[in-house]
Image (cartoon, grey):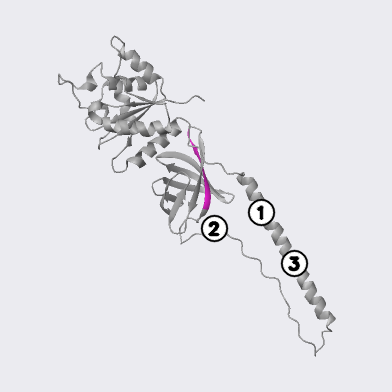
């Protein structure tokens, strides 16, 4: 599968600082595949063709929209968005025309422009779901954008591999437990036989010293994952398997702790709550369970604003 390229579209007078910071973060995750600034077009070149070729080579276009994005004007007091030779307009219109994924990113408290404020070739932009990036939570917001791009490009972040396969590891643990249990039973039966034999050899009369009788210890209770409090989701170590609508799949380790917090290998952590079959994970999303699958649960989830089919299995 060929690598997917990303194009950042922005207006210098509106969001230049955000564009530079966002480029640095995205280029670190998708090195040499993030493009921006086609304003340095050589004299005599067809700027429309240059934009078409550059944007057309990308799989995703990120449109950074600030508070003045729709109202910035040129020296003649004309709104730039209405001009036929406006770079921003051409970049977004080219992406929409070629059916390239367009993700609006709102900065500086901007709101998504309505269809009435856009020229006809940008009208479809008003229906695109937008992400907001704020100064107070910049790192978290950019992380959400990167996760969206990973799903759109079909490149989920690889998880660290364990030295042994989970299935084989579980079988080995069960085998060891079984061997130890059988050995314990055999040892107890052997000990009881010795005690009974010793009692018989001593005659068992009324004047003989009573012999202690040993009984096998009761079997230890099986460890099960129990709720920490009433109506709380069972605590324990889980493996979360997710499948997106585009067919991509991913797996994360999730630890549900009895102090009301959780941790995951995806980097998310925080408090959680469980009620009415729904597990709310702070800073990540929610999972609604619809049934059981063996010792696990299945259902639907909305993580980072993206719907997934969910399977939660013990590990």
Tell me how far mark 3 sits from mark 1, CA to CA.
Answer: 20 Å
Q: Residue furthest top?
A: 44
- Residue 275 visible in image: no
Residue at 30%, 13% in the rendered image: 42
Q: Residue at x 38, y 16 (%)?
A: 53
Report the residue marked by disc 1: 174
Disc 2 + disc 3, Cβ < 8 Å = no
Q: Is residue 29 above or below residue 282?
A: above
Closer-to-camera residue (45/245): 45
Q: Position of residue 281 (x, y in %)?
A: 42, 49
304 lies above or below 63: below
* Residue bounds of the magenta highlight: 237-245
* Badge nearest the viewer, 3 or 1: 3
Q: Position of residue 47 (x, y in %)?
A: 30, 14
Q: Nearer the viewer, mark 1 or mark 2?
A: 1
Q: Mark 2, residues whose alpha carbon is within 10 Å: few (<14), some, or many (≥20)?
A: few
């Amino acid at each position: 599968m060929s690598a997917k390229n990303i194009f950042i579209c922005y207006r210098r007078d509106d969001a230049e600082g955000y564009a530079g910071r966002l480029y640095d973060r995205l280029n670190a995750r998708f090195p040499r595949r993030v493009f921006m600034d086609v304003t340095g077009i050589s004299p005599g070149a067809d700027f429309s063709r240059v934009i078409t070729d550059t944007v057309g080579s990308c799989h995703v276009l990120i449109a950074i929209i600030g508070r003045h994005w729709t109202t910035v004007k040129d020296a003649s007091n004309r709104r730039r968005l209405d001009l036929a030779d406006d770079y921003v307009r051409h970049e977004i219109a080219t992406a929409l025309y070629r059916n390239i994924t367009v993700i609006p990113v709102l900065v500086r408290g901007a709101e998504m422009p309505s269809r009435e404020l856009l020229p006809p070739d940008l009208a479809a932009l008003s229906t695109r779901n937008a992400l907001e990036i704020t100064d107070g939570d910049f790192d978290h917001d950019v992380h959400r954008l990167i996760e969206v791009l990973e799903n759109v490009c079909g490149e989920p972040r690889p998880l660290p591999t364990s030295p042994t396969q989970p299935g084989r590891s579980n079988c080995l643990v069960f085998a060891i437990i079984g061997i130890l249990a059988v050995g314990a039973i055999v040892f107890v039966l052997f000990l009881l036989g010795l005690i009974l034999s010793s009692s018989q050899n001593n005659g068992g009369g009324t004047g003989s010293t009573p012999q202690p009788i040993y009984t096998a210890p009761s079997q230890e209770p099986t460890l099960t994952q129990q709720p920490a409090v009433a109506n709380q989701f069972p605590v324990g170590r889980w493996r979360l398997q997710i499948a997106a609508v585009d067919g991509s799949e991913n797996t994360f380790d999730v630890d549900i702790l009895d102090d009301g917090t959780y941790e995951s290998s995806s980097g998310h952590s925080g408090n959680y709550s469980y009620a009415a079959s729904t597990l709310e994970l702070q800073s990540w999303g929610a999972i609604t369970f619809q049934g059981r699958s063996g010792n696990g649960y299945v259902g639907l989830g909305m993580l980072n604003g993206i719907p997934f089919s969910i399977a939660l299995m013990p590990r």
